Image (tube, rainbow, N blue to C red):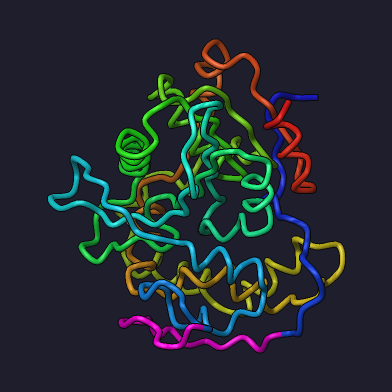
């Protein structure tokens, strides 16, 4: 088996049957706290979160918080979204869950509870430019900025070597990070790794309307429906809920700018870094997309 596997993003197994949800195209963003205890989501999440019926997604969304992360490229701390462990412990290395391209920590809604139940210290972290961080000041979201932001998050809150888990493009994020900050990583685990692409290349000279047109399509419901359908052998119960959850972060007002900035600056190209990675981490674990238990058993082994 090759060390690095290229496949579609790792998707957790569907939860119990749920009523189908009609997807709304509202881009309205919540600006005030929810008054009803039944909708006690963080106030910074798009209001579309209230339409979600997936219980696992609801539970994890309620735990998302923003914590300040000071970086060298932003004058003020970036309020950065994540799910923190209920209790930090020193008996084993913390597990930090990244997500795939244009996604969020909600990608881990079925897996995260299993890791906590197993007694692991688990963090689900939104990569800069995606997820639910506050990017109102429009900080750069290129590769170097994503890397520094993750490092400063680690240095401020985690503070000891971590098991870094990267699904799909998150594996490229993990490779780039580990090569530059090996002292922060104790182990690497990739799931359905997408690391052999050469990025988007430098598009800074391209007329801006072209990448913005691209992200408009990326955000569109038809494309999201199609992409979600490709991830399954058959349409699961709650299919439209999956689409809604995967698209939720796109409803934040800075998502287009952040995604375009990532695209025009070249995206991830870690081909050269793979050879640098192997001497540093000779026992990288590579998993194909599958059940949550595969990751859990790998972490506990």
Location of the N terminus (image quadrant):
top right
Which residue lies most toward the right here?
A: 234
Q: Which residues are magenta?
A: 21-37
At 31% across and 54% down in the image, what residue appears?
67
In this orientation, which residue lies closer to the viewer: 274 or 130? 130
- Judge whether residue 114 is colored magenta: no
Quarter residue 293 falls in: top right
At 51% across and 78% down in the image, what residue appears?
49
User: Residue 269, can we see it?
Assistant: no
**Principal secondary structure, stretch drawn in magenta:** loop
Which residue lies most toward the left here?
A: 75
Quarter residue 65 falls in: bottom left
> Relative to residue 129, is residue 239 drawn left or right?
right
Location of the C terminus (image quadrant):
top right
> Relative to residue 162, is residue 295 drawn left or right?
right
In this orientation, which residue lies closer to the viewer: 178 or 30? 30
With respect to residue 189, does 74 lie above or below?
Answer: below
With respect to residue 70, does 51 lie above or below?
Answer: below
């Amino acid at each position: 088996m090759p060390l690095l596997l290229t496949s579609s993003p790792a998707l957790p197994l569907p939860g119990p049957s749920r009523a189908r949800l009609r997807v709304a195209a509202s881009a309205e963003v919540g600006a005030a706290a929810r008054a009803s205890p039944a909708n006690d989501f963080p106030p910074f999440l798009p209001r579309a979160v209230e339409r979600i019926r997936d219980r696992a997604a609801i539970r994890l969304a309620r735990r998302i918080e923003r914590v300040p992360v000071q970086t060298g490229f932003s004058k003020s701390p970036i309020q950065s979204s994540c799910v923190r462990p209920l209790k930090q412990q020193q008996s084993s290395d913390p597990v930090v869950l990244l997500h795939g391209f244009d996604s969020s920590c909600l990608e881990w809604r079925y897996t995260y509870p299993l890791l906590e139940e197993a007694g692991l210290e688990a963090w689900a972290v939104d990569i800069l430019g995606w997820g639910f961080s506050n990017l109102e000041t429009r900080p750069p979201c290129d590769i170097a900025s994503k890397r520094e932001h993750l490092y400063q998050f680690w240095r401020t809150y985690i503070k000891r070597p971590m098991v870094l888990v990267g699904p799909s493009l998150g594996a490229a994020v993990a490779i780039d990070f580990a090569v530059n900050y090996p002292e922060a990583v104790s182990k690497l685990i990739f799931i359905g790794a997408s690391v052999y692409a050469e990025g988007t290349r430098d598009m800074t000279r391209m007329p801006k309307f072209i990448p913005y047109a691209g992200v408009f399509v990326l955000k569109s419901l038809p494309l999201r429906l199609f992409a979600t359908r490709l991830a399954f052998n058959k349409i699961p119960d709650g299919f439209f809920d999956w689409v809604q959850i995967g698209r939720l972060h796109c409803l934040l007002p800075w998502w287009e700018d952040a995604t375009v900035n990532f695209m025009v600056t070249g995206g991830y190209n870690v081909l050269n870094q793979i050879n640098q990675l192997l001497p540093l981490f000779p026992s990288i674990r590579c998993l194909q997309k599958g059940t949550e238990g595969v990751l859990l058993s790998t972490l506990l082994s």
